[in-house]
Amino acid sequence: MFELKSVSKTFQLPNKDSLQVLQNLSLTVNKGEIFGLIGLSGAGKSTALRTFNLLEKPDSGHVYFQNKEIHGGQIDQLRLVRQKIGMIFQHFNLISNKTVEENVALPLKIAGWKPALIQARVLECLKLVHLENKNHSYPNQLSGGQKQRVAIARAIANHPDLLLADEPTSALDPITKIEILDCLTEINKKFGLTIIIATHEMNIVRRLCDRVAILDQGQIQEILPVARGEIHPQTKLGKMLLEIT
Ligand SMILES: Nc1ncnc2c1ncn2[C@@H]1O[C@H](COP(=O)(O)OP(=O)(O)OP(=O)(O)O)[C@@H](O)[C@H]1O
Ligand SMILES: [Mg+2]
């Protein structure tokens, strides 16, 4: 359903060196699944995640979304990507001088929704994340967990088919972390929304994911199923991550 095919990416560094961050990366994510990308810091998780919505353009290779080539062909399908892929981040990235309601409404405004429909959809999304009573608050009046739930509401407002989550719980305490993971699970179950999540932690993968790819220096070491919270890595890195996180 969503596919990276032989994707490579090299960054040019200021000292004229270059750094290959993704090396011939190929992976397929099925519709409706929660797919994890795990690896150590610098493994290329965020870069890989950002190639799905073309925030990062691969140097070579192809990106497919719903079996349509969105990168690697003649032209990039940026409009499709913007409308159909939502994203959430470690530090929430809310707009501080807009209320909760205005933050969630933003992607709908950009997509050209009618004001009356926007109002209803915003409330619906805030209800989904159990924040309907915070619609007039500003981000700095909310806890980290509440901010991330606003970010989730904003990311799903325009009915995306894919949600990208880049370490969405790294800035949260352990209890709030579980609350956010359960919120993502609920949305996945309710709407069949496909989710790709980048993380350092196997305990997140065990709680949330259907499958996980272990990434090391821009290459996939192995792709594993997660069955009833259990994972059985074969590689050294996979075993180590399982043991310590
Ligand atoms: N715009 C950029 N310019 C140059 N180098 C970059 C750029 N973005 C990322 N990198 C480098 O690419 C490598 C992979 O970065 P990336 O952010 O994808 O890793 P990550 O697995 O998400 O790490 P973390 O767990 O710390 O978030 C790192 O060495 C990083 O320094
Ligand atoms: Mg990252």
Image (cartoon, rainbow, N blue to C red):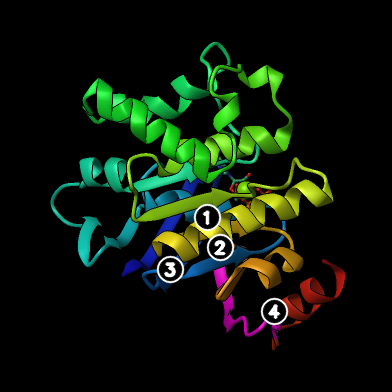
Q: Earlier in the sequence, mark 3 or mark 2?
A: 3
Q: Earlier in the sequence, mark 3 or mark 4?
A: 3
Residue position for label 2: 218
Decide if residue 56 is in sight here: no
**Residue 222 lies in the magenta-colored region:** yes
Relative to 114, 49 lies left or right = right
* Dot 3: element: strand
Q: Which residue is painted at 28% across and 60% down in the image?
A: 65
Q: Residue furthest left?
A: 74
Q: Amino acid at mark 1?
A: Gln
Decide if residue 40 is in sight here: yes
Q: Please report contact status of discs 2 and 1: CB closer than 8 Å, yes or no.
A: yes
Q: CA distance from mark 2 to mark 1?
A: 8 Å
Residue position for label 4: 229
Q: Which residue is painted at 69% across and 79% down in the image?
A: 229
Comparing labels 1 and 3, the label whose residue is closer to the camera = 3
**Residue 60 lies in the magenta-colored region:** no
Q: Which residue is painted at 36% across and 70% down in the image?
A: 31
* Dot 4: element: loop
Q: Please report contact status of discs 3 and 4: CB closer than 8 Å, yes or no.
A: no
**How many dots with numbers?**
4
Give coordinates of residue 187: x percent, y percent.
49, 56
Q: Amino acid at mark 4?
A: Gly
Residue position for label 3: 24
Q: Quadrant of residue 161 in the image?
A: bottom left
Q: Which residue is painted at 69% across and 69% down in the image?
A: 207
